[in-house]
Image (spheres, grey):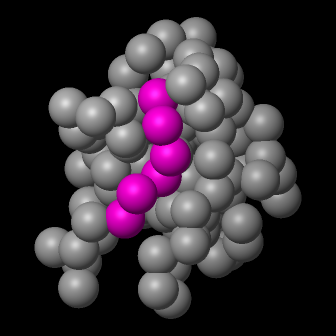
Amino acid sequence: MAEIEVGSVEELPPGSMRLVPAGALTIGVFNCAGALYAIEDRCSHDDGPLCEGDWEPELCIVVCPRHGARFDLQTGIPMTLPAFESVPTYPVSVREDGVIVLEVPD
């Protein structure tokens, strides 16, 4: 696994999201009330951008802007149609120096 620095914890406060380029992937990193989640920016329904839509920080759900499919940020599992396949999620953590780190496949 490769590590990508996302930024400092202060730069991603609760209720915020950041898109992070990771090679051929783009990954959305979300802060839900202090819990950090990372999900691929690709809706499993039609391969459109997922993380550019609305999201619900209080429920940790992202909503696809194209057709409204809702995904659990922790698991990537779709919660509503038209999506029925999960979206990949990635481990994210905070180092001792306060930098958020995303782990992605090499």
Q: Which stretch appears magenta?
A: 4-9
**Can you say whether 3 is above or below 30 in the image?**
below
Where residue 20 sits, quadrant-wise, is: bottom right
Tell whether position 12 is magenta: no
Residue 56: x percent and y percent? 66, 22
> Which sits in the foreground, 29 or 69?
29
- Looking at the image, residue 79 sits to the left or right of residue 13; the answer is left
Residue 98: x percent and y percent? 34, 31
**Can you say whether 85 is above or below 37 in the image?**
below
Residue 54: x percent and y percent? 78, 37
> Which sits in the foreground, 31 or 69?
31
> Which sits in the foreground, 80 or 18?
18
Residue 95 visible in the current orientation: yes
Residue at 23 percent across and 74 percent down: it is: 2
Q: Residue furthest left?
A: 1
Task: Give the overall secondary structure of the magenta segment.
Answer: strand
Residue at 66 percent across and 29 percent down: it is: 16
Residue 12: x percent and y percent? 58, 31
Q: Residue furthest right?
A: 66
Residue 79 visible in the current orientation: no
**Can you say whether 43 is above or below 57 in the image?**
below
- Looking at the image, residue 104 sits to the left or right of residue 84; the answer is left
Residue at 27 percent across and 66 percent down: it is: 3
Image quarter where the C terminus lies is bottom left
Where residue 74 sits, quadrant-wise, is: top left
Image quarter where the N terminus lies is bottom left
**Can you say whether 39 is above or below 3 in the image?**
above
**Count the marks: how many?**
0
> Which sits in the foreground, 81 or 50?
50
